[in-house]
Amino acid sequence: MSVTLPKRPARRLRLVRSQHKAPAPAPRKWFTWRRSTPYLLILPAIALELLIHVIPMVVGIWMSFVELTQFFITNWGEAPFAGLDNYDVALDFSGPLGVQLLESFGRTLVFTLLVVGISFTFGMSAALALQRFRRGRGLLRTLFLIPYALPAYAGIITWKFVLQRDNGLLNELLTTLHISDERAFWLIGGNAFVSLVIVSIWQQWPFAFLMTMAGMQVITEDVYEAAAIDGANTWQQIRHITFGMMRPVNATLLLLLFLWTFREFNTPFVLFGATPPDSANLMTMHIYNSSFISWNFGLGSAMSVLLMLFLVLVAGLWALWNRKVTRNA
Amino acid sequence: MREQTSFRVFRWLVLIPLAIFTVLPLYVMVTSALKPLRDVQGAFEWWPSNLTFSPFVDIWSTVPLAEYFVNSLIVTTSATAFSVLIAIFASYAISRYAFRGRGAFAGVVLSTQMFPGVLFLLPLFLVFVNIDKSLGFTAVYQTRLGLIITYLTFTLPFSIWMLASYFNGIPRDLDESARVDGASALGALFRIVLPSARPGVIAVAVYSFMTAWGEILFASQLTNSASRTLSIGLQSYANETNVYWNQVMAAALVVSAPIVAGFMLLQRYLVAGLTAGAVK
Amino acid sequence: MKTRPLAAGVSAVLLAATLAACSSGDADSGGAGVTLTYWASNQGASLDNDKEILTPELEKFTAKTGIKVKLEVVPWSDLTNNTLAAAVSGQGPDVVNIGNTNAVTFQSTGAFYKFDDAALTKLGGKDHFVGTAFATSGKPGEPPTSLPLYSQVYALYYNKKQFADAGLQPPTTWEEMVSAAQKLTKPDQNKWGVVIPGATVNASMHFSYIFSEQNGGSAFDASGKPTFTSQGMIDGVRQYVDLMSRDKVVNPSSAQFAEVAQAAGEFARGNAAMYFAQTSGINTLAQNGMKPDEYGIVPIPAPAGKTKIGSFVAGSNISIFKNTKHLDEAIEFVKFMTSDEEQAILNKAYKSLPAVQGVESAISDEPEKTEAFEKVLAEQAKPLPLIPGIQAFQASVGSAVVGLIAKAATGSQVSEADIRAALEKAQQKMASAPK
């Protein structure tokens, strides 16, 4: 295929490299404005990242190694060192807490795969459908992006109303259409999981749509035209050109969606309150509960660290895979 | 260009259900906000039989919504302004300089995307409390300032990542020639790079604004009645003796309207910014 | 050229300065006119209602002593967390209300001032307080870290008209209550015998506790170890869950009620003939437009032949933070709030029972209601266990029961095995809780 990729990546490499060589070998002074400019530029960002992200994270990791219960809350500096006790409890899959963590991990994984998979499919399909679509395109695009623009709690609380048993729209719709005769519960019991997935997709898919749409905009018309002249039909064009050129965007998008969805907190919190039904008890809620309701912050931190390690692992594997794919491409 | 019929069918099969899925809750929000309390307590009515605007009046007295609104506005605009400024500096450094630690910095910043919020909620709270203790007055704990610096940091990683990609797309020759003409690094940044990166900057600002306006978890622990923001305030309609669904919907509409309107005005920049950002 | 890069660094400093400028620095300047910060719990019908009730009283206090009080009414949903946060940080209000359920839990954090004998004497001594209420102030044998302010007990509220129309008498046993409820339940007209706040964790713990005590069960043994799977405990939970699952006198929709007030609303609208509530229910019902002569109050009945327990001693206590810079003023304030005069005024306004001796309770203008509550407090109230793990008990058993109610609501039969399994799980969760 005679597809030309945009030249940007290559050019960027050259630029950074030329930058590397450009400055004449500076005199061996310990400080020069020229050399410290980039550091001064990133200084505010570093300071804030340290204050808000890095230091608290280190404190959080420290907390996971101490016995931080209600007895040591006021003088937490003196909480006894617990070693790996908190991790032992969390990872003892024959004990009740380990089992709960494992269950909640499995539930979160299924939830994440469903939400990411469906959101991505929705987003990609909508972006494809709107590509090269003239009439009403702007209107539909704006409409699809509204759930993304809406503050999370406003959207979720509206869903909470939609999902009410007696006065919600969903049951009214289901009974009017005779899909079900009985008014079902959507916020308790097993259905709560379904609701959680639906509401999360409603919130997530516009982002997938936004990103894929943005990704598609850089594929110029003439690429498709060239393919059309070669005899490719619409589906072949989508498969070979769109999907091919979208791969880097999609890879990043899927990773971001996965990381964000796996640590989703807002949706279950607003939908169900601090104590969600078992079927919707995601890992973040489970941790929030053991920290702020059962007041065992050491254990809560240990579970958070495990959650983070898992996400780091996922991102690491992704990076390895991505590098391999990029190299082979 | 000609499209297959099957693709046209696919288009409508995709667009119509998605449009319904998207619109339904919004429809519920708007119509329920126009119903009296009685009518939102019974079975859902598709069309308000007794149209009323009173929920839009009542929301301001049921809970101190105006105070929450002001808090959210102050916190969100400040967080956005500073976040954008700091992200511009940092991403310019990443994009234009090959300095030692560049990779490490980018790595740390991006890896914060993996932190689960619950892990550093309590620690952050400890950090804030200790800052206040050493300062001797309440500076960051449960204040707007504390929330501002928290939110602005939350949005930094994505903003830096997006802006750096955007800057990479702007030919270096432009600012290099400006530098040859005697402009300083910042001069080149502000006079040459930024004007051509405007969609990227606006995209980042929109993103930061939306993130800060909608955050819940940290707002639930890091605010008190004086600094409470809308995300928590909105839930107080359910704490009352009755769940005022009509008022909840009216309030949701009121707090969403400005941000959705702003988003609609600026969305083309967001798409443009992401286009450059996503396709780095 | 050289000065420009400096701007980046300067901007960081500027940022810090600007941000500092917009923070609210409400530092105490010290000196004359001490200001106490007081977190009041949400006792009234709304936060504003609380402010209206408390503000004139606080002004009285200021006029009397010159000490100013900065009032913040905190909803219950936030109170425990905010107090916890204050305990962790050592930075909080000077004086705070806590739910007396949590008194021992909070005591164990060590964040609160211990009322020693000298302080107690200043406040009028132990005997100034009602004995059952004072028992909730902390672990027995240790100096209390909280003092009772408002006492409450549970009772059964019933709709007088619906009972009269059906020719029913207020129930004296659980069986009578259930049969009355069954007569009054007409699902097709959305009329139900009883309404419960099915998704409310703390209320669910309250009911499990009360009904377990009726059945001779106990949540904890003498050494403080959880015994959630004892037969009495299982029977008690079953008695509660059966209202929905077997007796079918509760609208399944109430399994979604995450606020006690929602149950009150159903009762006030006449959709349910009975509901269990504390004394403050009177306020809630008034707020919902139900007149006092439309409902009656009797103790929550026990099954025939079982122990007549209808409540525990609920209510709110007042505590002083250990880190307060104004201890004397704080004690002065507690003294004011627990004085005979203020107890009479505040408990009347809040429809709660006075926590001090010799103050007439004035919950209701109708003496029989006040008497019913006083009878429950005097004869049928058993205090909750005074153990640090009580907060974890509330979370684990409360949510287990919420889950069982959800199961009953979604149509499944809830068997004894289900109840045992749920309580077993709750008990295992306690393993991680502080002993």
Image: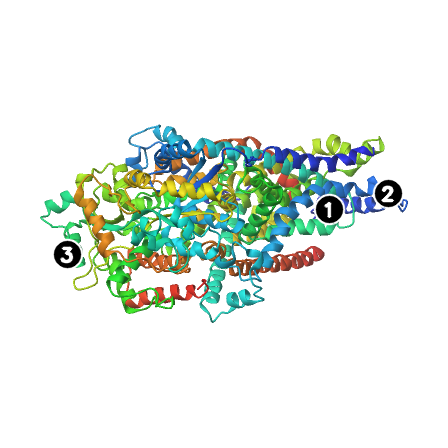
Circle 3 residue: C176
Q: Secondary structure at mark 2?
A: loop
Please give left or right for residue C85 compared with residue C349 in the image: right
Labelled disc at residue A9: 1
The span from disc 3 to disc 1 (Cα, nearest Å) is 81 Å
Amino acid at circle 2:
Pro
Please give left or right for residue A7 compared with residue C150 in the image: right
User: Which of pointers 3 and 2 indicates the residue nearer the eye?
Assistant: 3
**Cβ–Cβ under 8 Å for marks 1 and 2:** no
Q: Chain of mark 1?
A: A
Labelled disc at residue A23: 2
Earlier along the polypeptide chain: callout 1 or callout 2?
1
Amino acid at circle 1:
Pro
- Whole-percent x and y of residue C316? 35, 47
- For the point 25% across and 38% down, the residue is C286
Along the line of sight, the residue nearer the viewer: C338 or A180: C338
Q: Chain of mark 2?
A: A
Q: Does any portion of residue A229 appear in the rendered image? A: no
Which residue is the extreme one toward the bottom? A94
- Whole-percent x and y of residue C337? 37, 41
| 10 Å crowding of disc 3: few (<14), some (14-19), many (20+) | some
Along the line of sight, the residue nearer the viewer: A48 or A182: A48
Q: Chain of mark 3?
A: C
Total count of labels:
3
Q: Does any portion of residue C6 appear in the rendered image? A: yes
- Whole-percent x and y of residue A41? 73, 40
The span from disc 3 to disc 2 (Cα, nearest Å) is 93 Å
Q: Secondary structure at mark 1?
A: helix
**Cβ–Cβ under 8 Å for marks 3 and 1:** no
| Figure check: A9 above or below A189 | above
**Cβ–Cβ under 8 Å for marks 3 and 2:** no
Q: Secondary structure at mark 3?
A: helix
